[in-house]
Amino acid sequence: MKDMMPNFNLVQPADLASAISTLADAGENGWAMAGGQDSLDWFKDRIKRPTTVVDLSGIPGLTGVTETADGGVEIGAMTTLTDVENNEIIKSKFGLLAKAAGRVASPQIRNKGTLGGNISQDARCWYYRSGLDCYRAGGNTCYADTPEGMNREHCLFGASRCVAVTPSDTAVAVVTLEASMVIEGPNGERIVAAEDYFIGPAINIEKMTVLEDGEILKAIRIPGTWANAQFFFEKVADRNTWDFPLVNMASAMKVSGGVIEDIRLTCGAVECVPKRLNVVEDIVKGSAPNEETAELGAGAASRGASPLNYNHFKIPLMENLVKKAIRG
């Protein structure tokens, strides 16, 4: 029955140490809940059945934006997407992230959903989220990667049994900005580069991030490296509100003397992890940000793509977004 929430123990700890201890004790049966926008759907559909749910919303120190000594910012992982979108420091220095946060879902969801939750959310796949026994769910097939499979939202790169993609809008932004993810767990704090925070199915098909049992994403640190760069973010989706991306693109570019001095481009919804376009970056550095350079970059963006039956359209989408990011 999908109209009733299944039973679980709800724990609302007052501090981070208690939350970590509870999650560690629960092991694979524990669930850390941030804004609850995704979690509650999983529970109501009875696809995820944790016995212990730890509500992080009452823990102090997990929200807010603080400037750092290097000109960057540290953002609490429980900071709502609305607060990220509207924060004056983020808007003035790292408008890329503010814009990405503002394109997530709808205003109502952004008011409740958190930055850490959006970054860390699970794969979006019709079959996986319907409770079928696919590879990601511990089964022995991928229903999307079949001749009849509905796979227009799925990957162009990095398939390894599973062809689902990362659905996050903010993930591509934090990777582009060279953010670090601050993780707290039973063994203390560890810091992981945003680019290394996400893991593909070839490494662990049942996980999207490096978080282990008992660990909590505490904060996102963005260095001052790309502050006030030329930013670009665009999301292509079936609907402008509420929907997940078919393709999204984030870039940060430094132009000096009429040429591209440095650039980072990250594409989402084309792989299980945010895809850095390193080859494109190498090609366009040192060139003028014009139409010719944009064409060269776009031509390299989709190298190695392996489209499925119904998602060939993602290749020109991806290439056109690269062009727009480079030429402005």
Image (tube, grey):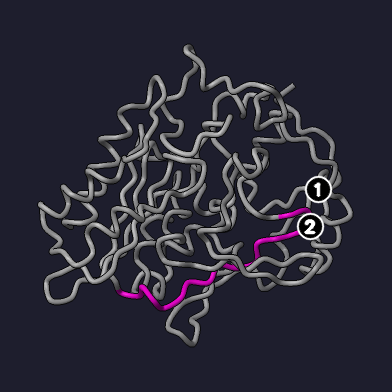
> If the image is split into quadrants, where does the C terminus sit?
bottom left
| Mark 2 vs 1: CB contact within 8 A | yes
Give residue 37's position: percent from left, percent from top: 60, 44
Please tell me whether residue 261 belongs to the stretch shown in magenta: no
**Residue 300 visible:** yes
Given the image, on which type of amino acid does mark 2 rest?
Gly
Q: Give me the residue at 20% from left, 49% from top.
A: 323
Give the residue at x 56% y 56%.
114
Name the spot of residue 287 as percent of width and height, x first.
15, 64
Closer-to-camera residue (180/14): 180
**Which picture quadrant has residue 40?**
top right
3D distance between C-alphas at marks 2 and 1: 8 Å
At horizontal 22% and vertical 50% (from top left) the residue drawn is: 297
Q: Residues within 10 Å of mark 2 (few under 14, many from 20)?
A: many
On screen, residue 69 versus residue 239, left or right, reads right
- Residue 225 among magenta residues: yes
| In-image side of 236 versus 298 (left or right) | right
Q: Element at badge 1?
A: strand
- Residue 28, percent from left and from top: 81, 45
Most extreme residue toward the bottom is 69
* Badge 1 amino acid: Gly
Q: Determine the secondary structure under disc 2.
A: loop
Q: Is the N terminus in the top left, top right, bottom left or bottom right quadrant? A: top right
* Quarter of the rendering containing residue 75: bottom right
Seen as rendered, the residue at the extreme top is: 148
x then y, percent, for residue 215: 74, 59
Question: In front: mark 2 or mark 1?
Answer: 2
Disc 1 marks which residue?
30
Which residues make up the magenta segment?
A: 212-228
Number of the label disc, if any, that sits on residue 214? 2
**Residue 108 at least partly seen:** no
Q: Is residue 62 above or below residue 139?
A: below
